[in-house]
Image (spheres, rainbow, N blue to C red):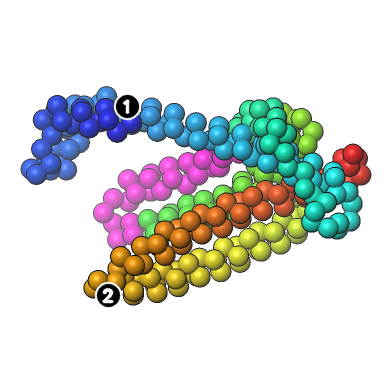
Amino acid sequence: MVLPLAFGIAWSDWNFDTIQPDDALQLLLKNWWMVAWVVVALTLIMIAAVAVHAFVQAGSVGIYLDGERLAGPGQPARAAYRAFAPDRWWAYGRRFWWPVFLIYNIAWGLLGLILIVPMVALLAAVLIVGDSPVLAIIGCAGVVVIFGLLLFGGLLVTVWSDLGIAESVRSGANAREALRSGARILRRYFSDVVIILAVLIAITIAVTFAALSVYFVIGLGSSIPGVAVLFIPAQIALSFAQNAVSVFLAAWFIAAFTGLAFKAHGASDAR
């Protein structure tokens, strides 16, 4: 993605020392192919990323469901849930990545369409009001509304899509049917969903504060002349630890909702 842009800028009349905002807009319009290339490349990268993520999630949810079936009802020992096998994970991924891919696009696409409404309303209000003193109030209120919808809507869509994925892999339903079933489970077990979200948010906040505290200590140590290089391994280790915790929480999150979907169907799924 970067190389064509670099060559294009090198061969064009871009001068970053003297360029002005108005000139930059004219240069972008003149070199429209650069903008088009960025849009196309980013779109393809995002599609590929979501497709890979869908494959991983489909395989993982299949293994979680196998674990629930092996363990059976009640609260058996942790070892009873061990159902992982590479070939089974791969088979689930190959079979269900496409409906999972569609579930992500449908659920998040609907949230995007909802967010367009306040964005357009805010833009229209800004154009109508102009330079009036009310502009700042409208702008701040609009940003709060959009951010709130993005935050709470994002949580809701994450839960909804995870339940839909569990339902698709569990029953073989297509994306729309799985999302409908996921919405029913969400309504039926709403209190359980709230508890799962509360636990996840609490753990995330605790981990974030712990990481910030360690970063603060590392920052103090790194400010000492001649000692900073000794803290580089600690920074690398902390980065790996944060990524590991993030992966663990994401896996725990969808595993919890897979268990909830399994619970919703009771003994009919135990085999």
Secondary element at image label 1 = helix
Residue 36 - label: 1
Local crowd at mark 1 within 10 Å, few (<14), some, or many (≥20)?
A: few
Q: Is residue 183 visible?
A: no
Quarter location, residue 123: top left
Which residue sits at x=47%, y=52%?
Answer: 146
The answer for how far apart the CA atoms under marks 1 and 2 are is 47 Å
Tell which tag, 1 or 2, sits nearer the viewer.
2
Q: Is residue 57 left or right of residue 43?
A: right
- Name the residue at the top extreme: 33
Residue at which label 2 appears: 224
Q: Which residue type carries mark 1?
A: Ala
The magenta segment is 107-136
The verdict on residue 123 being magenta is yes
Q: Give x and y (percent) for residue 34.
A: 27, 28
Disc with the residue nearer the chain's start (1 vs 2): 1
Q: Give x and y (percent) for residue 232.
A: 36, 62
